[in-house]
Image (cartoon, coloured by chain):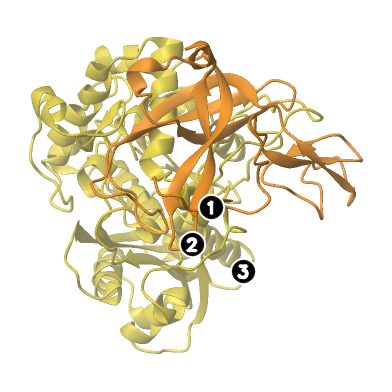
Chain colours: A yellow, B orange
Amino acid sequence: MAKEIAILGAGMHPWGKWGHNFVEYGVAAAREALADAGVSWRDVTFVSGGATVRCGYPGYVAGATFAQALGWQGAEVNTSYAACASGSQALAAARNKILAGECEVALVIGADTTPKGFLAPAKGYRPEDPDWVRFYLGITNPTYFALYARRRMDLYGDTLADFAAVKVKNSLIGSRNPRARYRKCFTAEDVAASAVVADPLRLMDICATSDGGAALIVSSLDYARRIGRGDAPRVAAISTVTPTFASAVVEMPDIATDSAAAAGVEAVSYRASLPKKAYEEAGIGPEDVDLAEVYDLSTALELDWIEDLMLAPRGEAAALLRAGDTALGGRIPVNVSGGLACFGEAVPAQALAQVCELTWQLRGQAGDRQVEGAKVGITANQGLFGHGSSVIVKR
Amino acid sequence: MSGKPQAPAIEGWFTMAAKPHLIGTRCRGCGTYFFPKQSHYCRNPACDSTEFEEVELSRTGHVWSYTNACYKPPEPFIAPEPFEPYAIAAVALEKEQMVILGQVVTGIGVADLKVGMPMELVLEPLHETDEDIKLTWKWQPLAQQAR
């Protein structure tokens, strides 16, 4: 209880391939979040930004870049880079500042402008960089997603139809989200007709990269009560743990796993360890969760996450999906925002976008995407170099 | 293929023999293997050794999973024109207890692969430069040998 902070405001610039400066998206998201919170920009004393590494120096110092764009007013700034978990680490920095009593109201913000096509590494001949090595050898991001998908087919009997059903589910709900980039309802036939990218995954099984921006206004519980917002959704846990040695799953961007010859294989996989710590921190269990926003970099990966979040026993996520349990109106709706399938990934903004969705859901403001009576939501994501996060929001 | 000399795509990562091995290191403290080579600090949290020996890794293993690349990867990958899709396998080495990724030899597609299938390491061209043909390690189904 004592470790909670309030979410007073949430804002997003719609996802798309707009091609504008990322700062524009961040400013739009911040202004929406401030208005939503009913907080003046001058009352924000800490700005915590998720960095983007694709937009030059302003992206490396995103916290300051956004603070300057919104108008220098003397707030302290922070910038966090943690690949896909950047937004969560920026949120954790704000939480720490608030819980330490050094700040009452903080802006947490991330935005990105992404290049076309595959994400590519820095140039040169750099065999000491695993990200460079794997691209040189012809191994892209979809390679890893496909290896995991094939394992699901082999171990659990998941089918291409299951993977397509994830896309159909997410596109149906995402079509109702005005902030989503892709708002067309796709059918299983559409998925099957799309080109194979990395067998067994097709183009429509794999998420795109997008431009977008997301922001949160967070505060101490005391501040929230003072402005009459004591009932605001709260951040109950932020998990940003690293993997543990020896991990048996080959993770982006590595060309090989750890060797377990001496240490033995770690019992809990990295993805599963992220929500585990979040549940422990929040003092709740998977049975308490009303909805989840997970990183569906691929359709098959959504099924992995459902099991990692312990919302289904290992190997049974597809059964949950087939029963309609993960759709809106089901027992445990997953990705009612439309997920990455409808948004595409805007790296430093994506983990915050997940929290924005939970905020609106827990307030009952999600319109025709609303999960009835939602009180507890969880996010999960994972990116390069042992970065990942899981955030629990409750009301 | 031209008569250019052959050279490793990445120097020191594998032997250039007819039956090639990947070159890794083994921690003298705890026995953990590393590929790519790790020679300065052991990444096992229970070990603080800084002593390593270079070792040739097992050249056979079993398929952990597999896929293919149907689209041309971005740089630094150098693709032939026209681009030809290739299969990729993640192969588990028993002794080292690790999984290593690599392309699968030309001519073998995903339809020819299965999880658990025995594989062996071979060398094949990755791309050509003005001076030489750059070779890399690839995985090949062990049964191929018999043909």
Residue B54 pos. (x, y %): 81, 43
User: Which residue in the structure is indicated by mark 2?
Assistant: B131
Q: Residue at x 45, y 81 (%)?
A: A64
C-beta proximity under 8 Å, tags 2 and 3: no
Which residue type carries mark 1?
Answer: Pro
Q: Which mark is residue B5?
A: 1
Q: Nearer the viewer, residue A33 or B84?
A: B84
Instruction: For the N terminus of chain B, give its image quadrant.
Output: top left
Report whether mark 2 lies on the same chain as mark 3: no
C-beta proximity under 8 Å, tags 2 and 1: yes
Residue B144 pos. (x, y %): 48, 16
For mark 3, give the secondary structure.
loop
Q: CA distance from mark 3 to mark 1?
A: 67 Å
- Chain bearing mark 2: B
Q: Residue at x 42, y 54 (%)?
A: B128
Q: Nearer the viewer, residue B53 or A158?
A: B53
Q: CA distance from mark 2 to mark 1?
A: 7 Å
Above or below, comparing residue A99 to residue B70 in the picture: below
User: Which residue in the structure is indicated by mark 3?
Assistant: A101
Which residue type carries mark 2?
Answer: Glu
- Chain bearing mark 1: B
For mark 2, give the secondary structure.
loop
Q: Nearer the viewer, residue A166 or B93?
A: B93
Residue B47 pos. (x, y %): 87, 43
